[in-house]
Amino acid sequence: MRRAPTLNPTVRTRPLVLSLALVALIGAGCSGDDEESGPLGLAGVELSAPTERPDFVLTDTSGRDFDFLEETGGELTLVYFGYTECPDICPVHLAQLSEALDRPGMPDATVVFVSVDPGRDDPDTIREWLDNFDDDFVGLTGSVDQLIVAQEAAGVVPADIEGDPEEAGYLVGHAGQLLAYAPDDRGYVIYPFGTRQSELVEDLPVLAELTGEEAA
Amino acid sequence: MLLAVDISFWCSTIAEPFTWTPRLYPGIWAAMLALAVPYLVAQHRRSRSGAPNGDRRRRTFRYLSGVLVVWLATDWPIGLLGASYLASAHMLQYLLYGLVAAPLMLLGVPEWMARQLLSKLRAYRAVLWLARPLTAGIVYNVVLVLTHAPATTDVLRANQAGSAVMDVAWLLSGLILWLPICSPLPEHTRKSYGAKMAYLFIAATIVPVFPASFLTFSEFPLYEIYELAPRVFGLEAGTDQAMAGLIMKVGSIPVIWGTLLVMMMRWARDEGVPGLGADDERAPHPA
């Protein structure tokens, strides 16, 4: 008959302790990154100097003029310049934003997606694409010149077509960050690609409280 | 000549959206051949030598079925989904390696082949040590926890070599888990059904509950690679992760509890419980 192996009790407990420590590794993933980037203590990248809410007029997905400053002034607003055939970061950014804003306790925010690919993104295409994320997201487009004005007003590098625009599947180089404007009409922070939902959920309620009255 | 499909060595994280256009992974095919061909050659040689090789067909079927499951779990599409897009696919891969492929492969390896292999690799003592229930249970669960920690998964899945290491670790830990139950070497397996059942229950069902709970009930997505991946099948990152936790929790039930049930019935049959054995003697009914 096989004898049960005898183990030194201290040896026997070491693997157990090791296993428990390893289980804690999973938990470590829940703790998130507590790094703060600036005076507001936001998880996003705080700007060294706040920017003004940009002033531009484009066309929304129902074909009407959309005066960005007038329509969104005084509201927490998130703006993203991208295009519907973007293979990677645009859909991920919008999905992250949509999933973060759907969480309980999140403030109301206006999300504005500006297509920088007027050659392919007509209003219907933009609307159909945005509805995959949230049918409340605002979609805007315009002429090439109008879009350049809008991007410069927002302080991002204007998008540039990479490759031959006559060929299907061309890519568009564009700003990859999400711009956030607080209700006091100032932009304090941007969210580059790679921003986690936990960071958005941490920051957006703080931004929603920046109404401009707190300093008075 | 331009190829219409992408070719890589092993499935790892990629930035593009998932499509049903097949992607080719020659490294995975080479690994599958490395698992299957030496086995078939050894079986063939054994048969030609005239040495006893009972149950060859059934063993070969089991082993190749195990290799097939490894291939399905590793290659496109499941392999790519698990390496790049979905935590739930990552978990499905893990279960396929450890709970389906590993026992099938062990059941398919004849004793003579296992002895030859361990002798060639000079690994007999090491495997004997790994086959001890305490060691096997700890190794399996340490690999489970390590490879499901977000930091590990995010780093390893990001590159092809790391991704291959993770897949190999899962298969090896699965083989180790099942050694005390169905190793081809009788000195590896527990003699009593009770010991086998207790070992399998403790080793394969208790620890996984903790990471599964973290995944199911976490407030936010834990894995960066899956959270920042283009969404697949309209699944939100949080929903996908909760599904991964559920798969980890309940996915093992059919295999583990099915195995426990089979062992219990065999135990009862060996103990002579009426109705479970072909040659049992039924007690006469009272007149």
Image (cartoon, rainbow, N blue to C red):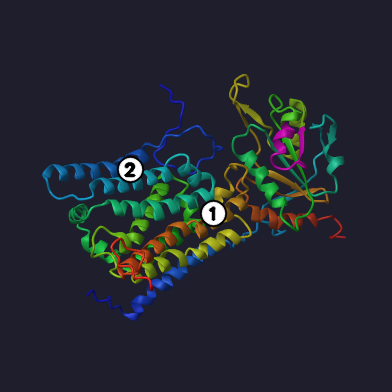
Instruction: Tell me which segment is drawn in magenta.
Output: A126-140
Q: Element at badge 1?
A: helix
Taking the view exactly as shown, the residue that stands out farthest to the front is B287
Image quadrant where one finds the N terminus of chain A? bottom left
Query: Was residue B271 drawn as part of the magenta stretch in this picture?
Result: no
Q: Does residue B134 sit above or below B39 in this rendering? A: below
Quarter location, residue B130 = bottom left
Q: Which residue does the image show at 63% across and 59% down from the upper left? A: B219
Which residue does the image show at 83% across and 43% down from the upper left?
Answer: A72
Label 2 with label 1: CB-CB less than 8 Å = no
Q: Which residue is mark 2?
A: B31
Three-letter residue code for mark 1:
Ala
Kindly indicate the quadrant of the structure image that contains residue B257: bottom left
**What is the distance, in whole Å, between disc 2 and disc 1 at their CAs?**
26 Å
Horizontal and vertical percent position of residue B50: 11, 45
Residue A66 on image: x %, y %: 84, 35
Observer-side mark, 2 or 1, equals 1
Give left or right: position of B84 versus B204: right
Residue B89, x across and y down, in percent: 50, 48
The mark found on residue B244 in the picture is 1
Q: Is residue A79 visible?
A: yes
User: Which residue type carries mark 2?
Assistant: Ala
Chain of the residue under label 1: B
Q: A191 left or right of B101?
A: right
Determine the residue positioned at 78% across, 49% down: A109
Badge 2 sits on which subunit?
A: B
Q: Is residue A136 magenta?
A: yes
The disc at residue B48 is none
Q: Nearer the viewer, residue A182 or B277?
A: B277
